[in-house]
Image: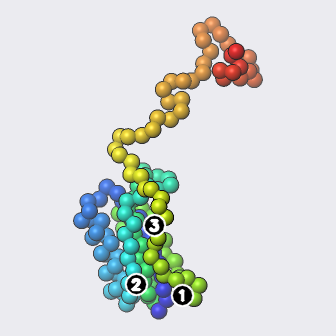
Amino acid sequence: MNTYETVFIVRPDLQQEEIEKELEFFKNNIEQNGGKIIKVEPWGRVTMAYAIENYAEGYYFLIQFEASFEYPEELTKRFRYNENVLRFVVVAIDDKKFKLNPRKDTGAKRYVKKPGARKPREGEEGEEFAPEAGEEFAAGEETTEDSAE
């Protein structure tokens, strides 16, 4: 039996019961295929670095388990065909090089964006530079405030 680790992201618009059901499904699938779960860490709702399928956040889960050499391929199929899973990764862990330690809290703050709340972008309130009526810019001439002085 080899040691594996999987991290997967579940859609944030699911109800809490549905999110727990997804986690239980994958835990049961590992055990039904002869695997042994070592550790399960729900990381919670986290803002992603970039949007995936128009979601800026997702529920992250980590599962460390022991299974046969062939099983990660089966687990990968289960992740791929599950519409609630946004992204996943399954990796083999070398027991000699890595210790299976719990995730340490680094003190980094996790921000959850409130619906409708966002910071305005620079230039968003119509601060575009355009020639005033009757004024034209020559080719190559800059259109910034400094060049107008």
CA gap, disc 3 and disc 1: 23 Å
CA gap, disc 3 and disc 2: 20 Å
Foreground: 83 or 56? Answer: 56
Colour option used: rainbow
Amino acid carrying label 3: it is Asp
- Given this view, does label 3 or label 2 mark the residue nearer the observer? 3
Tell which residue pokes out farthest to the right in this image. 140
Look at mark 1 in the image and give the residue it sits on.
Answer: 95
Describe residue 128's horizontal placement relative to residue 105 as left or right. Answer: right
Q: Does residue 131 appear in the picture of this structure?
A: yes
Q: Residue at coordinates 50% horizontally, 53% vertically from top-left?
A: 50
- Mark 2 burial class by Cα count in 10 Å: few <14, some 14-19, many 20+: few
Q: Earlier in the sequence, mark 2 or mark 1?
A: 2
Q: Residue 105 carries which label?
A: 3
Q: Residue at coordinates 56% horizontally, 85% vertically from top-left?
A: 94
Instruction: Reply above or below: 122 against 77.
Output: above
Please, what secondary structure does the residue beneath circle 3 have? loop
Q: Which mark is residue 38?
A: 2
Q: How many labels does the image show?
A: 3
Q: Does residue 78 appear in the picture of this structure?
A: no
- Given this view, does label 3 or label 1 mark the residue nearer the observer? 3
Amino acid carrying label 2: it is Ile
Q: Residue at coordinates 34% horizontally, 79% vertically from top-left?
A: 27
Tell which residue pokes out farthest to the top in this image. 134
Q: Which of marks 3 and 1 is nearer the N terminus?
A: 1
Describe residue 14's horizontal placement relative to residue 34 as left or right. Answer: left
